[in-house]
Image: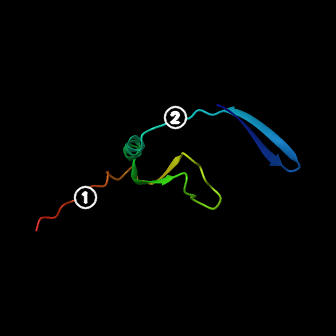
Amino acid sequence: MAVTLFELDGSRWMRTDFPLIQRWYEEVEIRERLRKAGFEEPQSFDGNEPMFEGSVHEGRMFFVGRKRDARQPPYRVRKTLT
């Protein structure tokens, strides 16, 4: 898909043309790849629900996560025996 973008720069409109290539992934695959890259508990947001005022991205999903410190081992839950 080719995209044409116009941005106002002072009193002039600037035109930018670029190709846009998108690929669909299963949500579970994205979550797994984020975890393998060091992101803990990634959260997903449906693009149909505004994340901030005026933003709707129909048919898309966004992920937010916190990357653990590379010097720390992966987080593990320890069970305590009583």
Q: From the viewer's perspective, is 1 left or right of 23? A: right
For the question of whether residue 68 can be seen, the reply is no
Residue picked out by circle 2: 23
The quarter of the rendered structure image containing the N terminus is top right
48 up-or-down from 26: above or below:
below
Give the structural element (helix, strand or loop) at label 2. loop
**Residue ID at (83%, 48%):** 9
- Amino acid type at circle 1 is Val
- The answer to whether residue 18 shows anywhere in this view is yes
Q: Quadrant of residue 25?
A: top left
Quick check: 46 left or right of 71?
A: right
Q: Which residue is mark 1?
A: 77
Residue at disc 1, secondary structure: loop
Image position of 70 (left or right of 22): left
- The residue closer to the viewer here, 70 or 79, is 79
Q: Are marks 1 and 2 in contact (CB under 8 Å)?
A: no
Q: x%, y% of residue 55?
A: 62, 55
Within-10-Å neighbours for mark 2: few <14, some 14–19, many 20+? few
Q: Residue at x 35, y 53 (%)?
A: 72
- Earlier along the polypeptide chain: callout 1 or callout 2? 2
Q: Nearer the viewer, residue 21 or 75?
A: 21
Q: Nearer the viewer, mark 1 or mark 2?
A: 2
Q: Residues within 10 Å of mark 1 (few under 14, many from 20)?
A: few
| Rendered-image quadrant of the C terminus | bottom left
Q: How is the image coloured?
A: rainbow
Cα distance, mark 1 to mark 2?
34 Å
Q: Residue at x 54, y 45 (%)?
A: 59
- Give coordinates of residue 61: x percent, y percent: 51, 48
